[in-house]
Image: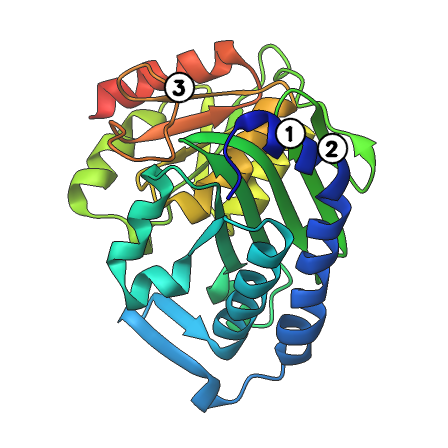
Amino acid sequence: MIQDIETIDEFLAHRTADVEEAVRTAAAMEIMPRFRQLAAHEIDEKTGPHDLVTDADRKAEEYLTEALVKLLPGSVVVGEEAVHANPATYEAIKGEAPVWIVDPVDGTRQFVHGDPGFCTLVALAHRGVLLASWTYAPARDQLAVAVRGKGALLDGEPLRAGSPAPGRDLEVATSHPDYTTDDQKRALLGLWTEGVGPRACGSAGLEYLAVARGELDATAFSWEAAWDHAAGILLVEEAGGAHLTLSGEPFRITGGNTLPFTAARDAATARRLLGLLSGGA
């Protein structure tokens, strides 16, 4: 078993391309052949009509679970579908083993409806610290990679989040109303104010990518499932952005965050949104 962070750093220095290959292969084998080809029996509800899972989700996660553990012996996988089947597996995020955090199809609703706005998310963490992430949008053939302390790349080109233009309304992607409770909606109400243009989010992973690219000013989310946020949080951070929870602390993948939280193009924008969210909570 891998025992220390230096060993994982060595892995990241030499094997990130192998992880990329595994992500691309999972998408090519299990996701894209089903895109716009799903039969009714390949789609199921989990907690309700807005929480869908497909054969593509299940098969891609199974492939990635086997491939990633093989690449990094001693590591474990926390995947969205495995946790749905056995919630206790989520606790591995807090453990001592390196952990792969996997969302095989982020934006399943878009995927089911034939919309290309979905992606596969993989992050590697150790003892609660995010070390690397891969965000792959297979229908667009876009791959973003972030490595802690090494920056972020989109298709091999550096990502820079930059800062919002002065005087322009902030564009903020927020938790989709279909996925929020009444309390969460009230907490997000602070964003409905002059100078901010909130809209419902699509795939969380692609919204984080848009922040890292400087195309979206910020996100404001009211849930903390690590598979939705781990890859994007590191991507934004390595592109020069910042993330803060309602308590003023950075988002923790191990949970216990004070929600909602924001990820923004720069620290000043994150602090501004945090003030608005505090007013709505």
Left or right, residue 277 beside residue 31: left
Pointer 1 with pointer 3, Cβ within 8 A: no
| Residue 220 x, y percent position in the rendering | 40, 32
| Residue 198 x, y percent position in the rendering | 44, 34
Q: Which residue is mark 3?
A: 273
Q: Which residue is mark 1?
A: 9
Residue at mark 1 to residue at mark 2: CA–CA distance = 6 Å
| Residue type (three-letter) at the residue carrying disc 1 | Asp
Which residue is at the front of the view, 240 or 88? 88
| Residue type (three-letter) at the residue carrying disc 2 | Ala
Indicate which disc, 1 or 3, sits on the residue closer to the N terminus.
Answer: 1
Pointer 1 with pointer 2, Cβ within 8 A: yes
Find residue 13 and name its label: 2
Q: Residue at image x 67%, y 17%? A: 162
Indicate which disc, 2 or 3, sits on the residue closer to the N terminus.
Answer: 2
Residue at mark 1 to residue at mark 3: CA–CA distance = 34 Å
Residue at mark 2 to residue at mark 3: CA–CA distance = 36 Å
Left or right, residue 97 beside residue 121: left
Q: In the rendered image of this protein, does residue 178 appear above or below residue 239?
A: below
In this view, the mark in front (1 or 3): 1
In this view, the mark in front (2 or 3): 2
| Residue type (three-letter) at the residue carrying disc 3 | Leu
Pointer 2 with pointer 3, Cβ within 8 A: no
* Badge 1 density bin: few <14, some 14–19, many ≥20, Cα 10 Å: some
Which quarter of the figure has residue 29?
Answer: bottom right
Which residue is at the front of the view, 98 or 52? 98
* Badge 3 density bin: few <14, some 14–19, many ≥20, Cα 10 Å: many
Q: In the rendered image of this protein, does residue 30 appear above or below residue 161?
A: below
Secondary element at tag 1: helix
